[in-house]
Amino acid sequence: MTKTPAPPKPTAAELDLLQVLWPLGAATAKQAHQAMLKDRPDITYATVLRLMQIMHTKGLLIRDESERSHVYAPAQAQDTLQGKLLKDLIQKAFSGSAKALVMAALKSGISKKEREEIESLLKDGGPQ
């Protein structure tokens, strides 16, 4: 039985692009570039296009080539990839302890609103 290798972990720049693509679902390089300009006014279209091409090669994006402008979409859902990255972080940085991760996050400074949301989740038995 052959196991399909997991896609590589995205770099910081690739995660930035995925944060733009997840809400869009799919986008051309031009659409992704326009969306990224809000937070990174210095980013060029060529940089976004090249990054999307690299991410497609790595298996982080899928590409629809049926139109003149290729349309790219994330290969994994946001919660799936975040879950994998979180598990890896817990193993590598917190010796496998989710509690240690949570305690570090709470100590690093959260807003009053975030604290209230966390307390509400704990009282209600977790996310719905």
Image: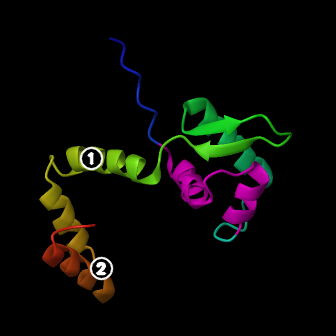
What are the residue bounds of the magenta stretch?
A: 10-37
**Left or right: 109 in relation to 4:** left
State the quadrant of the N terminus: top left
Relative to 60, say whether 100 is above or below. below
Horizontal and vertical percent position of residue 57:
62, 30
Horizontal and vertical percent position of residue 34:
75, 63
Q: Main secondary structure of the magenta part?
A: helix
Q: Earlier in the sequence, mark 1 or mark 2?
A: 1
Under circle 2, the secondary element is loop
Relative to 43, say whether 115 is above or below. below
Amino acid beneath label 1 = Lys
63, 92: nearer the viewer: 63
**Residue that appears at 14% across and 78% down:** 123
**Residue that appears at 21% across and 80% down:** 120
121, 92: nearer the viewer: 121
- Dividing the picture into quarters, in which one does residue 72 lie? top right
Residue occupied by mark 2: 110
Residue occupied by mark 1: 87
CA distance for labels 1 and 2: 21 Å
